[in-house]
């Protein structure tokens, strides 16, 4: 059986949707194309995709426990039972028979955690009020409200030893702090009784007056070319059209790409960066703070990466190959390498937060080689696999973060 819902942004009607009891859209008609989520534009098929992507991914850790708790067969039914509400934006669905409801009545910022039951008998829907029906990602996550606001707490993946992904979140947020970069999400973590960083925590940077629009929702970018340049330029242009300063946008991207390269962030997909928007005026406020850095620092590899292995790395990012992302950077000096920790300091940090010494040594060694490559990049060298395969008579230009004088004796370039 399908029922009628209004897709709303705050109290603005955006579309009329027919949704069955298991959360599947059976029909949709757009009423206000200016306020649909950016990606959807006037394409009805994209509304379906936006709704599906809004649900918890099927691969979520402990998913069956979550569904059982709320009596749902699948993640879309859970999404339906929570009115599609999120702590990252102001979109939601309102049942036609309760069209008098306002965003203030149901939004999670004020009402999250409360059970809002519009059907007290054995009716078709009981809205649960959980803030976790739209939290993405494969790791177990939970939104928790403290006195100063909402926080997102992430569990750790037992596939990777010692809770390293949570340590990574904390480590990289400390790097942003040392760099003096303001627009980042501050993560915290602590060791459990078993000496594992089982939880990382960060405060939500969104509110009723400030919502996150991911790069994929801003641009509609889903198919990325090999070098990513055209898509990134499209993103920059839309940021400018939305009211942001071009130099500010480009500098923010330069910094993010640089830090991601040095820390080997393998998951900077187009849903993991974006902008903040005023949901009332639809004007862009700022670039979103840098978030989600867990899949960094060689978290999924037990091996020490040498230079030739590092320049061949491919992973999920603005474009496929890491070295190609360097070509997207305009200001090579935006990241201050002299403020980055030494490999020895990296090893000590990871050991302090429960990572075994041999593993911490491997992380630090791979980081050291990566830092050498980035230092060469900042000095104007082209970083490529072909260049590494040519070999070096007296070693590469930078070795363990120091200029190699013998290289410059044997090469004209400086």
Image: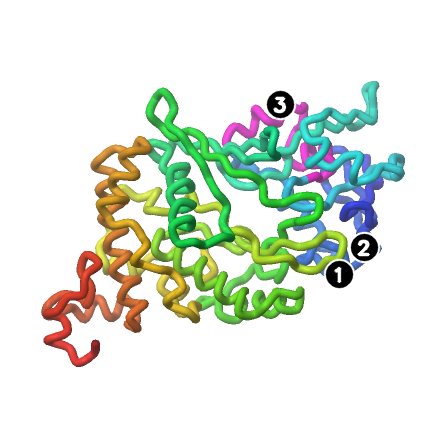
Question: Gap between marks 2 and 1, in whole Å?
Answer: 7 Å
Indicate whether 238 appears above or below 286: below
What segment carries the magenta color? 61-85
The residue to which callout 2 is attached is 30
Residue 396, x across and y down, in percent? 17, 66
Locate the C terminus by quadrant: bottom left
Mark yes or no: residue 215 visible.
no
Label 3 crowd (10 A; few <14 / some 14-19 / many >=20): few
Circle on res. 68 = 3
Give percent across and percent down for residue 224: 51, 63
Query: Which element type, helix, strand or loop, lies under badge 3?
Result: helix
Q: Dominant secondary structure of the magenta stretch?
A: helix
SS label for mark 2:
strand
Q: Residue 246 lies in what quarter of the image?
A: bottom right
Disc on res. 42 = 1
Q: Is residue 73 magenta?
A: yes
**Residue 281 in magenta stretch:** no
- Point out the tag, 3 or 1, that comes first from the N-terminus: 1
The residue that appears at 37% across and 27% down in the rendered structure is 191
């Amino acid at each position: 059986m399908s029922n009628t819902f209004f897709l709303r942004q705050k109290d603005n009607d955006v579309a009329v949707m027919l949704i069955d009891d298991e959360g599947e859209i059976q029909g949709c008609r757009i009423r206000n194309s200016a306020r649909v989520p950016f990606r959807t534009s006037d394409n009805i098929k994209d509304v379906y995709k936006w709704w599906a992507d809004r649900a918890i991914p099927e691969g979520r850790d402990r998913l069956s426990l979550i569904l059982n708790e709320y009596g749902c067969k699948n993640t879309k039914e859970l999404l339906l039972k929570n009115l599609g509400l999120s702590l990252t934006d102001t979109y939601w669905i309102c049942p036609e028979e309760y069209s008098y409801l306002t965003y203030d009545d149901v939004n999670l910022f004020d009402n999250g955690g409360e059970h809002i039951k519009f059907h007290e008998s054995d009716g078709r829907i009981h809205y649960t009020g959980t803030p976790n029906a739209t939290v993405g990602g494969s790791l177990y996550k939970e939104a928790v409200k403290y006195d100063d606001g909402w926080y997102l707490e992430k569990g750790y993946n037992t596939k990777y030893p010692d809770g390293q992904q949570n340590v990574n979140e904390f480590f990289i947020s400390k790097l942003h702090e040392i760099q003096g970069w303001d627009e980042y999400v501050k993560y915290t973590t602590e060791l459990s009784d078993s000496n594992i960083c089982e939880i990382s925590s960060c405060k939500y940077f969104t509110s009723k007056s400030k919502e996150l629009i991911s790069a994929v929702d801003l641009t509609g970018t889903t198919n990325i070319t090999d070098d990513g340049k055209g898509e990134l330029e499209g993103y920059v242009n839309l940021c400018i059209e939305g009211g942001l300063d071009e130099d500010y946008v480009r500098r923010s991207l330069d910094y993010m790409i640089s830090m991601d390269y040095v820390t080997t962030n393998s998951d900077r997909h187009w849903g993991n960066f974006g902008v903040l928007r005023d949901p009332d005026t639809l004007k862009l406020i700022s670039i979103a703070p840098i978030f989600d850095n867990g899949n960094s620092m060689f978290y999924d590899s037990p091996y020490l990466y040498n230079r030739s292995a590092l320049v061949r790395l491919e992973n999920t990012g603005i474009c496929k190959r890491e070295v190609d992302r360097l070509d997207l950077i305009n200001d090579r000096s935006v990241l201050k390498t002299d403020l980055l920790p030494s490999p020895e300091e990296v090893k000590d940090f990871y050991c302090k937060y429960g990572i075994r010494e041999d593993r911490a040594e491997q992380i630090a060694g791979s980081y050291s080689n990566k830092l050498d490559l980035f230092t060469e990049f900042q000095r104007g060298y082209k970083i490529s696999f072909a260049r590494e395969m040519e070999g070096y008579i007296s070693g590469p230009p930078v070795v363990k973060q120091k200029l190699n004088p013998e290289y410059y004796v044997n090469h004209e370039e400086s």
